Image (cartoon, coloured by chain):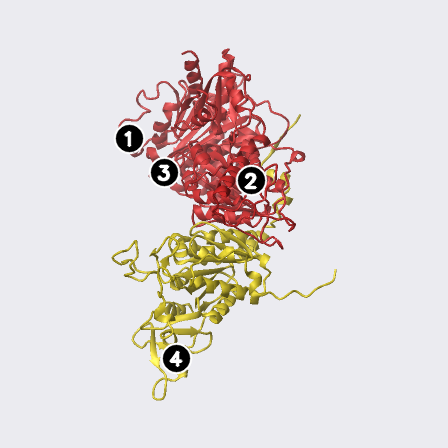
Chain colours: A yellow, B red
Amino acid sequence: MTATAPIPLTPKAFASDQDVRWCPGCGDYAILKGVQKALAEIGTEPHNVVFVSGIGCAARFPYYVSTYGFHTIHGRAPAFATGIKLANPALDVWVITGDGDGLSIGGNHMLHVLRRNLDLQIVLFNNEIYGLTKGQTSPTSKRGTVTPSTPQGSVGRPVAPAAFALGAGGRFIARAVDTMQNELVEVLKRAHAHRGASFVEIFQNCVVFNDGAHAAFTGKATAPDMQIHVEHGKPLVFGSKRDKGLILACDGPGLEVVQLGPGEYAEADLLVHDETSIALALLLAQLQPPAFPMALGVLYCDPVESYDHAVHRQAGDMGAQPAAQTDLQQLLRSGRTWEVEK
Amino acid sequence: MTRPSAPDARGVLPREIRDAVVIRFAGDSGDGMQLTGTQFSLEAALAGSDIATFPDYPAEIRAPAGTTYGVSAFQIHFGGGDLTTPGDEPDVLVALNPAALKVNYPDLRVGGLVVVDTGAFTKRNLEKAGYTTSPLDDDTLAPYQVLKLDITTRTADAVEPFGLGAKAALRSRNMWTLGLMLWMFGQDRAGTAQWIAKKFAKEPTIAEANVAALTAGYAFGDTVEMSSELVGYTVAKAEVAPGVYRTVTGTETTAWGIIAGARAAGLDRILFGSYPITPASPLLHTMARLKAYGVIMFQAEDEIAAICAAIGGSYAGSLGVTSSSGPGIALKGEALGLAVAAELPLVVVNSQRAGPSTGLPTKTEQSDLYQAVYGRNGDAPLPVVAAATPADCYEVAVEAVRLAVTYMTPVIMLIDGYLANAAEPWLLPDPDDAPAFPVRHRTEPEGFQPFARDPKTLARPWAIPGTPELTHRIGGIERDARTGHISYAPDNHQRMTDLRHAKIAGIANAIPEQDVQVGERAGAMAVVGWGSTYGPIYQAVRRLRAEGMRVSHLHLRYLNPFPRNLGELLAGFDRVMVPEMNAGQLVTILRSTYLVPAEGLNQVTGKPFKVADIVSAVRARLEQ
């Protein structure tokens, strides 16, 4: 057999033969494209990758990727993914979920997969609405959202997914926007490189039931002044003319927007992003337009031993052998036995 | 059974001889009755007796001391013969406080022996038990022999040299009592002394105090015997087959059976996902200690995550197993449906308890049969098997694994709180007879279709992530009968529903035919049971047959599908009676499946059937 150089993977190599069935104009198309591009750039063989999803529009995602895929039940994808990763830690496991799937019916599993720190990527498509069930309010819907289930406007207060993930003990928290491909691909690659649970919130637009939900910071006119792309070790600068920045507020714990320019603040006065600081990450995760820009990029990254690694380390310490090689005699005689003679 | 006795030269009465004895230890939840009973059982088994035990404890961990709802008991039946039940009525009741006496004495055989700790019959304890006058002073215990001993003081004296303080000293009352009982029934105490030393290895003073209490109780028997106040007994040994034995609970045998099953299947890992719930938690604890055998124990955040992780484990090529009790199984229902739909192997162990809802968490029942057979949305058939005895759990667990991996299906294994906790001696299986049913994960890409089926079993291939050129997508949406792609086609759903049904129904051809446990294959009545009613039905049928009745015992291991000859077998009997610890579940399934006029005998007291109750019910119906 002659050794051949591996054929470089292209985004197309990660496309399945299935027709994509999302609504025309859905943000999911852009995310699918971004994930396929990221996978190609990462260079994992498709057969070592598993996409796991629950229920919802986003959850159809695995059918459209040429890897292994498991479309499971509502909200439970993190639990299935946990079993898959524990059974075979060599697999590259991705959880695809939405705001309803991941933070409502599956909120408990999201909490625990993050706190345990399984080595997998969780990609949460946040469109602030239930799409597949035709437009009910979701746990991330802004207060006052009018939907068939909230005809007078929703009164529940929304959860901020990134803040939730930080609170749950997640060690990698990032954000991206569906239509911003370059940033999206970079964030996904960083998420993949992180050993442990990586939580990526993607602001995704539902054209049918909640069009423009993120327009306050994704619209052409608003984006430059309403987004801040954070980068480790770099000052927190933003604005169309890079003329704004963030400093620690003078009047109490929090952040403050300041103007850069002669006679005003200089870049050197600004806060420098430290992605290992959970305190800064919590502040960034809670910034909301219009008073503040939406923080995008890697808000937090501070790896510790992953759960699957620890589980197998402990099993190794116990001298774990494959079940197939069990010495039944040894197993069944562990403890007190006695012999009855003939 | 009692031989005439005469004092020997020293004036010591000879031991009376008994075939079998039933003892119940009863005390407060904090008195260590479960440990005492377990240890007595082990000594009896080691000495060559057959044993059957029944732990009975409250749901509260430590209910207020001295109250009737905090009473914990452990019953053991030991001796010669073929003991399959923990005994209908205790011959001996040990009551360490008034509440334990109050709750338990009505069960005692008339003429039986009550041993009480008079030191615990204080005014306060009597009040807490709801007694206005002491039952030791009136005629409450007139139908019984009563042995009044100040165990509290005697224990305090025995452990006094260790300077433990009054409260800690009292905790050794159970060991003093155990010592006395071991003496009374002619058992050895050396093993128990060793066990105490090991258990309290880190607290040598406590260990020494407990051994001293044990020894003092034992010595008390030897001493007081002289005054003939106390009689010792020699209990018959069991006639048992030669070989290596140990005592086992259904929890242990289930755990080992799962491992033996994975071994037989040639699988490297077992993904055991579970969540704490009474009475299933002991299995979780047992599996957690078996990591050396390829077990990955995952204590999940809830019941749903526990089963989902197990299914994920199977999807990735391990043996997925989850364990719970009824309320937890209810939560697992949706995920079970996914395992049926995605056709992945999975073993689900249900340690049944009394329901509905929280019910009686620590009390046994077998009322989850409908849930197992029918409890899912859509047409979602799956195999259901049930273990009959603690030892039987081993074979049934192996069989559950075999069905799961051979047919690519979830399998429910029903045990119950009684089987999980009860102990019996077990002749270890011959290692040369180790089961083998190797399965393989598919690797050949040629002609691979995720839902193409083995023509014989109708199982789909088990192709796992990580395998080159077999990437595919599966899920809960109806799948195309070959490719597994999403399919809403009407004919495809009909076909897939039919296939799922045929696959499970076809298992009837790959399991043994139903046998008769006792009696002929035809007669006046078949007494049909499943699960832990095995012991009492078996004894009842033997007793009725000794009276000349044409009664047989059939005990079902396979509850879905039924063995292929079951209908024919039942048709050979004039009547069919089904004793069950539920309101009538197997009986209706048998009636609807075979159109036989089966009758129920139903009891839901949280306790196993008494042999005598089944005997009289059968007799009454046959004499109608």
Q: CA distance from mark 4 to mark 2?
A: 61 Å
Q: CA distance from mark 3 to mark 4?
A: 60 Å
Give the amino acid at mark 1: Gly
Which dot marks residue A240? Answer: 4
* Chain of the residue where label 4 is placed in the rendered structure: A
Q: Position of residue A9 (x, y in %)?
A: 60, 65
Choose mark 3 or mark 4, whichever is in front: 4
Q: Position of residue A23 (x, y in %)?
A: 42, 59
The residue under the point 48% across, 44% down is: B205
The residue under the point 37% across, 25% down is: B105
Outermost residue, bottom direction?
Answer: A262
Q: CA distance from mark 4 to mark 1?
A: 82 Å
Q: CA distance from mark 1 to mark 2?
A: 53 Å
Q: Looking at the rendering, which quadrant does residue B65 occupy?
A: top left
The residue under the point 32% across, 21% down is: B140
* Chain of the residue where label 2 is placed in the rendered structure: B
Which dot marks residue B357? Answer: 3
Choose mark 3 or mark 2, whichever is in front: 2
Looking at the image, residue B264 lies above or below residue A26:
above
Q: Which residue, given by chain and number where applicable, does mark 1 sit on? A: B130
Choose mark 4 or mark 2, whichever is in front: 4
Q: Which residue, given by chain and number where applicable, does mark 2 sit on? A: B404
Give the amino acid at mark 3: Ser
Residue B426 in the figure: left or right of residue A231: right
**Residues marked 3 and 4 touching at CB (< 8 Å):** no
